[in-house]
Amino acid sequence: MKAQPQASHFIDGAYIEDDAGRVIESIYPATGEVIARLHAATPAILDHAVASARRAQGEWAAMSPSARGRVLKRAADIMRERNRALSELETLDTGKPIQETLVADPTSGADSLEFFGGIIASALNGSHIPLGRDFAYTSRVPLGVVAGIGAWNYPQQIACWKAAPALAAGNAMVFKPSELTPLGALKIAEILVEAGLPKGVFNVIQGDRETGPLLVGHPDIAKVSLTGSVPTGRKVAGAAAGQLKHVTMELGGKSPILVFEDADLESAVSGAMLGNFYSAGQVCSNGTRVFVHRSLKERFLARLKARTEAIVLGNPQDEATHMGPLVSNAQRDRVLAYIETGKAEGARLVTGGGIPNSVTGEGYFVQPTVFADVTDGMTIAREEIFGPVMCVLDFETEEEAIARANASEFGLAAGVFTADLTRGHRVAARLEAGTLWINSYNLCPVEIPFGGSKQSGFGRENSAAALDHYSQLKTVYVGMGPCEAPY
Ligand code: NAD
């Protein structure tokens, strides 16, 4: 199986290679096979990408919003037409099952391009401010050349979630995918150019954690939007602060799901499973601390165990497969180590807990795992695992559940399952999180803002709110009479 792209980077509307860069091997996580060999960007490639973006940005920003919107919407249409091929590539890039990628990856990227393509004509307006004889007006102007840096769990979606609002607002972008999933973003760049995007407006360079800082530190980059872990976020935000650059930080989480005694049991189990096992648990907003009311706990665990054991693990290219491998061997080792820590610290293993016997070969598979009787101080209840490991904790009162749910440095997302409408809203109001779901979990349509609070980051992706993070206000004061001075 091979998925070798024409070249490693896509700059100024074309593929380009520089063999001098460090080799990046793209590995298919289901088999361990090397499916492509790419090169990290050299300083010359990085400079070329930023210079191309800089040159193209003015022309792009000078186009009318409707004309820019048409390009983005055409790109969305092309992505939908090629959904299967893009999904197959995403599955090779990440190991996620085709059952998921067909409905969640290129499609959500296309949704983003379509949404921002559609709203820019009306969403980028400024205001007129009457001042008696004089007046002022404001306009929303682009930041310039912005950098996008992606994580490995949703390579195509992340590229589009960053590119669509950035480009809609008139910026140009240099995007660096994760070194573990270098393939998808190149296809997005190709499609944007095919849709009519002027050359140089969206560029992709490959690279790792040594390349990232060079991109962040480049003097012509005005803003950095990162999707990644909290430790990386601290480094990137720190470097950006040193040069007073704008940042959007989409970071990690350890989100709580609260299941009250009146919750619909099957819905709550579905929400907990969606919030822990989708993408083999490699989702930032996952609800990995599931607080279940004590009166419901054993019934909840029984259904959860039965349904979890029915998850089909295996070949991600088979449409019947529910769960594929983790992205890399290192990530699998990390997750297995957390599982061992959970056992050692006294959590009760309900199901899973290791490498599945059913899957043979070199893939990086881990069983969907549920721990019960987890307590707040355990390592698995505090740290982001980023794998298919659910922690079930139990509680007695609403007050207690809210306090314990909030006792985390993270604040990305949260969920509440209850049949009591007032309780749903009351609890949602008090949970410290950027995005909350009531009787649902992990749905992120482009229409709603998405992003974190506390250590999970700041800035928002999706919705009109994202445009605020890729543009700035410009104010013009207009004097309508003589300019008077006291001297
Ligand atoms: P990571 O932090 O290891 O890497 C993210 C990206 O940053 C990669 O492209 C990497 O090459 C780059 N990078 C690493 N060090 C850098 C530096 N010093 N300067 C600039 N760039 C640098 O994250 P990951 O392991 O790829 O992804 C998993 C993490 O991402 C998890 O913590 C997860 O919660 C988080 N995540 C968050 C969201 C969100 O929207 N909030 C979405 C997906 C993933």
Image (cartoon, rainbow, N blue to C red):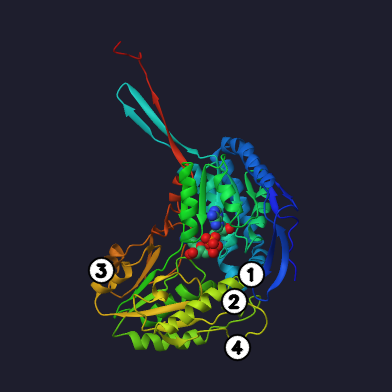
Q: Which x, y percent locates residue 113?
A: 56, 53
Residue type of the residue flagged with mark 2: Gly
Whether residue 32 can be seen here: yes
Q: Quadrant of the N terminus?
A: bottom right
| Label ID, residue 91 | 1
Q: Mark 3 or mark 2, which is nearer to you?
A: 2
Residue type of the residue flagged with mark 1: Thr
Image-based side of 200 in relation to 109, left or right: right
CA–CA distance in space, label 3 to label 2: 39 Å
Residue type of the residue flagged with mark 4: Asn
Q: Which residue is mark 3?
A: 422
Q: Mark 4: which secondary structure? A: loop
Q: Which residue is mark 2?
A: 324
Going from the N terminus, do you reach mark 4 or mark 3 first? 4
Q: What residue do we see at 68% from left, 74% from top?
A: 32
| Label ID, residue 357 | 4
Above or below, 153 relative to 334: above
Q: Mark 1 or mark 3, which is nearer to you?
A: 1
Going from the N terminus, do you reach mark 3 or mark 2 first? 2
86 or 297: nearer the viewer: 297
Q: Which x, y percent locates residue 81?
A: 66, 60
CA–CA distance in space, label 4 to label 1: 22 Å
Whether residue 118 can be seen here: no
Q: What residue do we see at 51% from left, 40% from top?
A: 143
CA–CA distance in space, label 2 to label 4: 14 Å
How many tags in the picture? 4
- Label 1 crowd bin: few (<14), some (14–19), many (20+), radius 10 Å: many
Q: Mark 1: which secondary structure? A: helix
